[in-house]
Every structure is written in structure tokens, then in C-alpha cells.
Image (tube, rainbow, N blue to C red):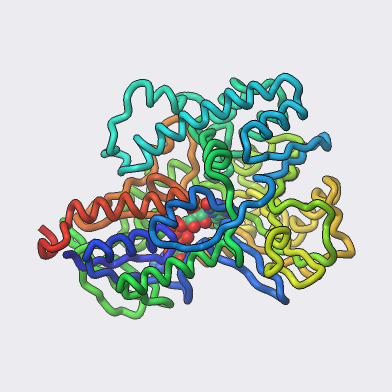
Amino acid sequence: MAAVNVVGGGVGGMVCALLLARSGHEVRLFERLPRLGGKLAEHRRDGFTFSIGPSLLTLPDLFRDLGVERDLVQPRELCRYRFADGSRLTAHRDPDRMAAEVERLAPGQGVRWRAFHAWARDCFEVSSRAFFAGPPNRPPVRPSLRDLRAVAPGRTLAGLARRFFQDARLRQYVNRYATYAGSDPYRAPAALGCIPAVEHDGGGWYVPGGLPSLAGDLAALLAGAGVEVRLDTPVAGILADGQRVKGVRLAGGERVGGDVVVANVDAAQLYGRLLPDRRRLRRIAALGPSSSAFLLLAGVDGRTDDLPHHSVLFSADYPAEFADVFRRRTPPRDPTVYVGCASADDPTQAPAGAESWTMLVNVPARDPSRWPISPEAYRDLVLERLAERGHDLAGRLRFVDILTPADLRDRYRSWGGAIYGAAYAGPLAPFRRPGNRGPRRGLYLVGGSVHPGGGLPLVAMGGRIVADLVNHDFPAGKGGAP
Ligand SMILES: Cc1cc2nc3c(=O)[nH]c(=O)nc-3n(C[C@H](O)[C@H](O)[C@H](O)COP(=O)(O)OP(=O)(O)OC[C@H]3O[C@@H](n4cnc5c(N)ncnc54)[C@H](O)[C@@H]3O)c2cc1C
């Protein structure tokens, strides 16, 4: 049995802590905020509730298998897309309905969508078997040449979209999946194109009461498994000699010993502050940060006809939008806007006769004081774009609260407010993220900034990967570090 200190109570840290406690280790978890969940968080005001992190849950069995018991609901549509020319595409979960919808939008392309979906399925099957199920350098199944071909190495997501679709709108729809990993579709690997298979085959789910309720469920499981959780307790450093970790130093000065440290903090914070390592930090910096989010949280009076839970209002020029975010590092002048309206499916999220709108724009992970536009002026620009695309909220707004990359950075101590640590850029990007084993014996990394990546399902998978590594290195019942 090892004494394990987990730093950070995001989903990756909680899943890992839970599995390690269940394997018989003595586990403590330190979280600097007064609550668990990390980015799985909400904002409340005047009877409105907004998710300020995940709004869509995929692969819910990963959580059910841990013991989370919840009735989930599935919004009527996966997502509704509106393109700059005013045309629409409703993404239905059922592949037959989806292919028919694509055919309606762009005659002749329905059959191409079926081919794309078959490719995405294959890519996801290979990725989950050979890449997501173990650490990057020790996959449980050695990928075959065919497996490697299935993930289209050397192709970008935009290249994949061009291969399957002639219609520019359908290419934009495929390219959007890069944003699930905070990345630029013109540089991200084609493998991100497996995400639609996850949505169409496994569904896109909502947790009644809001997705952050999942954090409460995991917290209850941690308590049941005997994990000692210390909230409001920032870790200021990792204690280590040249060989192995010895424990953690808390911000108040207290030292807590242990054999294992699982860092669920952003890898840039780990190597920048907690256990300084210039070489590893430079390697992360070379990847460049993922995008951050500019969030508008609006209490809206009245009910909008036929408003789905998830909609995406696309910009007219996607390459220019990503050039703004990733090359010019400025908020896009013509942004794509995601609108999440949880109250469309869950009346607890807004007062009667009103709606809670979470609007998200992908922006660079950079302090807004260095943007050429103030957050307030950018809020007005986003609301104007929204009005041009059919959602004029003038006269209906009770309030609009703003969250910027600086807010995300300060809340989670993430790299410039980046959602997923580094971006995925280049064909080898998934293998260039920091690995799950750190440079000292007993140090492990979990969470969205490391392998296998961000998003609730992947960080949960990462929690399992790290628990397996710790169990391998420190077998329970064998009395601590070998
Ligand atoms: C706006 C937004 C929208 C998103 N949408 C989706 C979505 O729809 N679907 C989806 O699946 N995913 C989505 N995600 C991504 C998902 O939320 C994250 O990938 C996931 O929650 C990250 O989990 P994590 O384990 O990396 O931990 P994090 O959530 O990053 O948590 C890390 C924790 O560590 C704590 N911490 C940091 N430093 C210290 C320290 N020194 N000492 C102690 N504690 C510390 C932080 O306070 C935090 O609680 C979204 C994220 C954002 C921000």
C-alpha cells in the first residue's frame, strides 16, 4: 500500500483518487478551491444556473462503471448548426436521420456522411483500444500498421473534411470537432474526426440539475471509499529528491509525506512552479496553448421558439477565425458562437418564463488586457453577431455576466486560461503531450493537459490509466515504495 497525495480535485484527480482508494492505498486529495470538480463548474445568479464548463456528456458509462447512478437525459437533437448563408443542419443521433439531413442540406452528400461516419467509427475503435487505454509509451495493445492507417496520420482534420465533403458547410461542420480539443482544424490531426462517432453511436447526454452535479456524485464516492479530501488547500510544491517524490508542501507551509504524488494540475503549473523543470516546460511551451473560452452568461426573458439545447452559429470565414485565435492571438472578429440553453431541457436552470443562455466563443489563451478590444466591447460584438444570425436578445436581457481567459486562468491555475493545456498541432500531437509518468519515481500526471487529453471522458480514462500505473509500481499490500 502506498501513501498517495493527489493535487487537484478535477475529474481526472477524483477518478484516480477513487480507484486508488478502492485498490487499498491511503489517499489524500488537496484542492485549492472550496469545491471539487475543477472545470466541471457552474455559475448562479438570480435564479439562473449556467454551466461554465462542460455542457455535453459523452460516454457516460465511464462514470456509471465507477458507481455514479443518475438518470441522464438526451436532448432531442445532438446539435443544431446555422451557417453564414442562413442554412441549417440538425445533427440527429440516429445515423440514418443524420445522413438524410445532410442529403437535404447538400444533395449527394448524404452518402459521403455515411462514409465519414464509418471512418470515424473505425478511428475511434482503434484509438480507444490502442491509444486511450494506456500510457502513450505503453499502450495495452501494440497498434498494427492497419491501426495506424485508420487514424490517418499525416492528415489534418481539415484535410479529412476535404477528403469526404465537397460542400464548404459540411467541411466547416467536420472542422468544428477540433474545438472539442481547443485546437485549430487546419493543424490538428485528422484523428479528432473520431468524435462524431462517439456522439452518434453513444449519444450526447445531459445531467438533470446540470452537469456539475456529477462532481457531487464523485465527491460522495470519494467519501465512501475513505479518501481524505482537503478543500481550500493549495499545494505550493512537490517534495522530492533527485530520485523520488517524498510528499507535498501546502501553501500554509505544512509538509505532508507520501510515496506517490498524482498531479491533476495543468502540466505547465507542475513544471513551472510545483516541481520546476525548465526542459519539460519548454517542451510544453513549444506545443502552444490550446484555445481558451470567452463566456457570456445571460439571463434571458421569455421563451425562444424552437430553441434547442445546443446550437452553433458559424462564422463566414473559418480559416480567418482560427488564424485570429492561433496565429494573431486575438479574439476573432467574426466568431463562431456556441449557444447552450440548458433550460430548454431542464426547468430548474432558469426562473419560470425565462431562459439561461451560455454563449461560448473560442479565443486565445491570453490575458484580455493584451487584446485589442475590451471584454465589454467584445461582449457587444458577440451579441451583435448573434442578432445578425437570428437571435436578437435586445429587450430580453436581464443581465450578461462575462468570464474571460483571465478568469479561467485564475480559477484553475491553467496556462493562460487554456482549456486543455497544449493544443493539438501536427500529426504527432497526441504523442507530444506530457506523459502520465513524471520525472521522479512516484510522480504521475493526470487531467486534460496530459495524455490522453481533455474532455470528461478522456480525463476519466486518464484517471484509470494513472491508477493502473500506480498499482503496477506500488502494488497494494506490498508496503510502500519498492
Ligand atoms: C468552457 C468549457 C467548456 C467545456 N465543455 C466541455 C464539454 O461540453 N464536454 C466535455 O466533456 N468537456 C468539456 N470541457 C472540458 C472539461 O471540463 C475538462 O477537460 C475537464 O473537466 C478537466 O478535468 P481535469 O481533470 O483536467 O481537471 P481540472 O478541471 O483542470 O481541475 C484541476 C483542479 O486542480 C486545482 N488546482 C490547481 N492548482 C492547484 C494547486 N496548486 N493545489 C491544489 N489544487 C490545485 C484546480 O482548482 C482545479 O479544481 C469544457 C471545459 C471548459 C472550460
Which residue lies at the image location 36% right of the left edge and 55% below the top edge?
463
Q: Nearer the viewer, residue 302 or 325?
A: 302
Q: Is residue 125 above or below residue 180?
A: above
Query: What residue do we see at 31% from left, 60% from top?
Result: 19
Indicate left or right for 263 with 299 as reference: left
The image quarter containing residue 256 is bottom left
Front residue of 120/444: it is 120
Give the percent coordinates (x, y) of residue 97.
68, 34
Instruction: Determine the residue positioned at 71% across, 75% down.
Output: 47
Where is residue 112 drawn, in percent x and y? 63, 22
| Residue 43 shows in this picture | yes
Total numbered labels placed on residues in the image: 0
Q: Nearer the viewer, residue 172 or 333?
A: 172
- Image coordinates of residue 283 in percent, x first then y, are 37, 43
Whole-percent x and y of residue 280? Answer: 33, 48
Within the image, what quadrant is residue 264 found in?
A: bottom left
Q: Residue at x 88, y 60 (%)?
A: 394
Side (left or right) of 1 relative to 21: left
Is 316 placed left or right of 431 in the picture?
Answer: right
The quarter in which the N terminus is drawn is: bottom left
